[in-house]
Amino acid sequence: MELYTTGYLDNGLGFLIAPRPGAHLIHLAAYLDHGVKDERQQENGISHLLEHVLFNPNNLTGAQGKQWEALAKSGARMEAWTGKEHTRLGLSCLPRDLPKVMAFTADLLRNPKVTKQALEHERKIVLDEIHRKRNRPEFLWTLVEEALYAPPYGMSILGPPEVVAQLNLKQMRQRALDACTPERTRLVIAGKVDSGAVRLIEDHFEDWYAPPLHAEHHPVEIVPQLIGVPSRSERVTLYLSCPGPALGDTDRPATEVFASLLGGGLRSRMFQRLREERQLAYAAQGGSSHWRRSGYLFMAMDLSRERVPEAFRCLMDLIREVQADPPGEAETDETRESFALRALHESEGPGLATKLAQHWLNDEVYFPTRAARLYRQVSAADVQAAAGYLNPQQMAMVGIGMSDEELAHLLEVVV
């Protein structure tokens, strides 16, 4: 059983306290409802750069620097992360240090400091990060999202180097004020904590004021494209994606089960058919990703160029099979049970704060036991229905080692 304390302060700040029996530490996460979704193309990457400037301990000076130095000596840890829809500041500490950590977090959020020195220091680091990741898998996945979505969801988290290079101090300071507001903030505290933490939250955040938000809400536009990255290699990687349910949609659990059944691991249908039975691909996998406002299913194949048409045709046949006939109960049971156990496993680690916050930003309370129950209720018919998301008419494609023309020809011949 999970018992949480949730609420909102008068200024709009939301909090969720999740005591975990047997925990030794406290994990405090401040989630800002601010990310790539709030960017324009001419400032793409500003959220990620801002996270570096505000939440890198090396940039903290004055009282903030002294506060962190004392906490670090007590074993506290701090990390930060930027996503499409939110920015996360996370701290882990011993229970005795929670009052100090709360005061430190409040100071960071209420008095965000952007100095010229920190901006130029972090800009160099981020530009280096962009160049280092150009040929890594995480960068290639940004192409998958770019091929499926219009801006802002089709934009990368890191941003183009030419845009990051020209972001100025005035822009960064204004963005810090826009991002760090009580209305955008959700505090999640998990671990060895109790409802008494509410008083700490009130003491440090109740008198925090910021003007009402007037943020633009860009629509999530699906604009499937073909993106080729030509090369002379005889080995290519093909990525396919289709729009799917958002995090809070009722058919999201069934879609996750379907995507895993199709491509999640060595026992998946994609791997068994394309790799083991037909030997058409070196590797084949699939899955799904879900945000608060959208989601998508993806498939990836690593194979030789000459095998692409046959492998693509085989994959389309495989999709049509699941759409026409529901999977067997044994196959469905195994896959949905793995998701149920994963939900329960997350409840016992620091990842619980992340899961709680993702839903809390959507004004939903996440219960691991309920999540496990929802997965276990997924039927074979639900999985079959979720297969309908894989619609070739809404399919985006990225070909590493292929041209746009080759991808277009592939669709014309096979679909």
Image: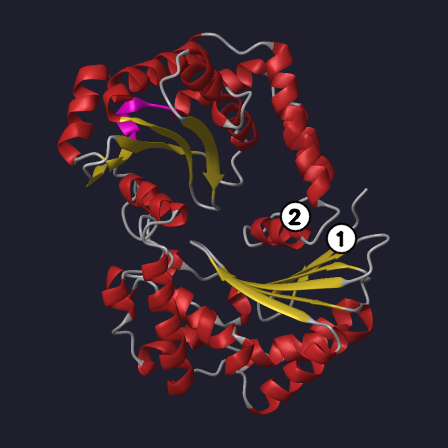
Is 213 located above or below residue 345 in the figure? below
Q: Secondary structure at mark 1?
A: loop
- Return the residue found at the far bottom: 62
Image point (58%, 66%), residue name: 79
Q: Are marks 2 and 1 in contact (CB under 8 Å)?
A: yes
Image point (48%, 25%), residue name: 263
Between residue 211 and residue 309, name the one nearer to us.
309
Q: Amino acid at mark 2?
A: Val
Would you identify the image quadrant in which residue 342 lies?
A: top right
Image point (25%, 39%), residue name: 223
Instruction: Measuring from the top left, give residue 60's x and y in whole percent.
Output: 54, 83
Check residue 365 in the rendering and tell me which mark sits there, or answer none: 2
Is 373 located above or below residue 144 in the figure? above
Pointer 2 or 1: first along the chain: 1
Image point (60%, 17%), residue name: 332
Look at the image and tell me whether residue 211 can be seen: no
The residue segment tinted magenta is 390-396
CA gap between label 2 and label 1 equals 9 Å
Label 1 belongs to which residue? Answer: 4
User: Within 10 angstroms of label 2, few (less than 14), some, or many (20 or more) residues?
Assistant: some
